[in-house]
Amino acid sequence: MSEVVNLVCSPEEAQDLLFLEQRIREALQLKPQDELDFRWRKRSIDARQRQIKVNASFEVAVNAVLAPRFAFQNFAALGPDAPVVHIIGAGPAGLFAALQALTQGIKPIVFERGKEVRARRRDLAKLTKSHELNPESNYCFGEGGAGTYSDGKLYTRSKKRGDVQKVLEWLVQFGAKEDILIDAHPHIGTNKLPQLIEAIRQQILAAGGEIHFEHKLTDLRVSNKRITNIQINGTTEIPVHRVILATGHSARDIFELLKDKNIAIKAKPFALGVRVEHTQAYIDGLQYHGRLNDDYLPPASYSLVTQVDNRGVYSFCMCPGGIIAPCATADGEVVTNGWSPSKRNNIYANSGIVVGIEPSDFPNANDPFVCLDFQKDIEHKCWMAAGQTQKVPAQGLADFVNGIKSEAFPRSSYQPGIVSVNLKEVFPAFVYDRLRQAFLDFDKKMPGFITNDAVVHAPESRTSSPVLIPRDPLSFQHTQITNLYPIAEGAGYAGGIVSAAIDGLNCIEKIATQQVSP
């Protein structure tokens, strides 16, 4: 039987096993002859004071050996008569729904519009180096979804929505380090995620599921409030009994398809703004009280939030040691996002700084596409302002606050390139003014945050879906179509890898409790 011991120590002490063992022995009042087995349970950095601390929690066994941290899931092979669920999208929601289906004896058949991870990487290289955009294979579309090449941050506030621990344990089972079970803000890294995603794919196939790449949903056949057939790639008709829609926040053609079929959708609040890049050393200095080049501390992050004119403005997807990437999904637009490698050892630190956008901000608030159209408009304006390429408009942070077009930039990790633009001319006043005031507020919380050594890149616009696909909260069925299950980010019910995965798990649980037929 194990016990839990909680300690507070310095970053140096947290890496000293002999020190930790002694502190644990003292906490449990052990005798010298008592044998001790211990491992990390949880850890977090507290850098609010100049004396930086580590909050440490350990699992401990006395005169015994700790049991394995968790048991690996056994995915048994499906029988020949297993009922079937069709899943549209191979992002975290679709893949975890497929895994969960296997545990319930349900055969998942997954259709993904994009390519598998290795082929997808070549399309990302073309986008970055020569601005060649493949609308079906990019940072948003392809095996693993948007999360595969945007870093794998696993922190979530969705702990009441489902089994977070199960999601993390499955990620470890398929190749993630056990650190994600320990760290307060777990992270995998863009360089590690492709292998993990491939391992999940191989498991689904080995147990009898199917995954089809470059298979795009192009039409739905609806009769008596049910989908009878789906059309793939404009030609292939497939009869279906249950359809899980896990298409992600950027599958705009799916929203248009639903509207064309008179399937209910609604406008949904989302957030939009910019991505700000400092050097990592600069952020380390601000957050760690001048402590730099430290082997005992991870690259520093930050989380900032304020209210401006009754609207939230906050940091989003902060990437220590990260890169800003081009994330457009169609010609005529530019989009930014950030990612970090597993070691977070790049010289840059970037974060989205975004403003909440509401349908009520616009005259036609009841139009289901009102927020989507605004998102498109900003992305197109930025594309035009930057020269109609995958370069993005940029501005020094101090210049942004002062409304001045920047004459030069210190550097940028955004490889397609940046163009000097006064972003006051790109964003409407209700966005720009709130961003400007928020930066002033953030500079009070992190003195020195505003500097022209920081570069503002625009836009950060794909924070979440601007469209909601309504569903019954108990059954997960669409409120109008009884065998359509809209889930995760694209439907408006999740906000990251873990919450999307949880939504996939929960959806299958709902289906399994309903009457399941082949």
Image (tube, rainbow, N blue to C red):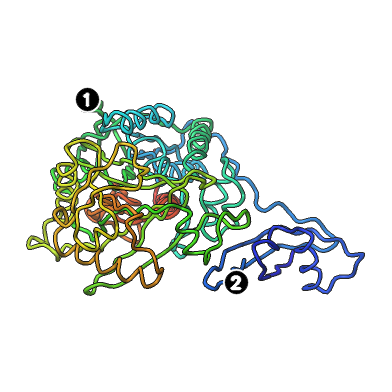
Q: Is residue 453 above or below residue 174?
A: below
Q: Residue at x 23, y 61 (%)?
A: 269
Which residue in the structure is indicated by mark 1? 235
Give the percent coordinates (x, y) of residue 24.
77, 68
Badge 2 element: loop
Q: What is the number of callouts on the image?
A: 2
Q: Is residue 78 visible?
A: no
Residue type at tag 2: Gln
**312 on left or right of 508:** left
Q: Give the residue pinned by disc 2.
A: 51
Q: Say which quarter of the image contains residue 6.
A: bottom right
Side (left or right) of 478 relative to 494: left
Q: Outermost residue, front direction?
A: 407
Q: Position of residue 34 (x, y in %)?
A: 88, 64
Residue in the foreground of this view, choosing between 472 and 310: 310
- First in sequence, mark 2 or 1: give its number: 2
Residue 129 lies, with reference to residue 418, above or below; the image says above
| For discs 2 and 1, the disc positioned in front in the rendered view | 2
Considering the image in quadrants, where does the C terminus appear?
A: top left
CA neighbours of label 2 inside 10 A, class few (<14), some (14 to 19), many (20+): few
Residue at point 54%, 73% (across, down): 49
CA gap between label 2 and label 1 equals: 64 Å
Q: Is residue 268 visible?
A: yes
Is 264 in front, or is 246? 246
User: With 294 as the anchor, is 256 left or right in this view?
Assistant: left
Q: What residue is drawn where x is 34% and y is 37%? A: 415
- Kind of residue at disc 1: Thr
- The local secondary structure at tag 1 comes to loop
Residue 198: x, y in percent? 49, 33
Q: Residues within 10 Å of mark 1 (few under 14, many from 20)?
A: few
Instruction: Estimate the x, y position of residue 59 in percent, counting from the top left.
Output: 71, 62
Circle 2/circle 1 CB separation < 8 Å: no
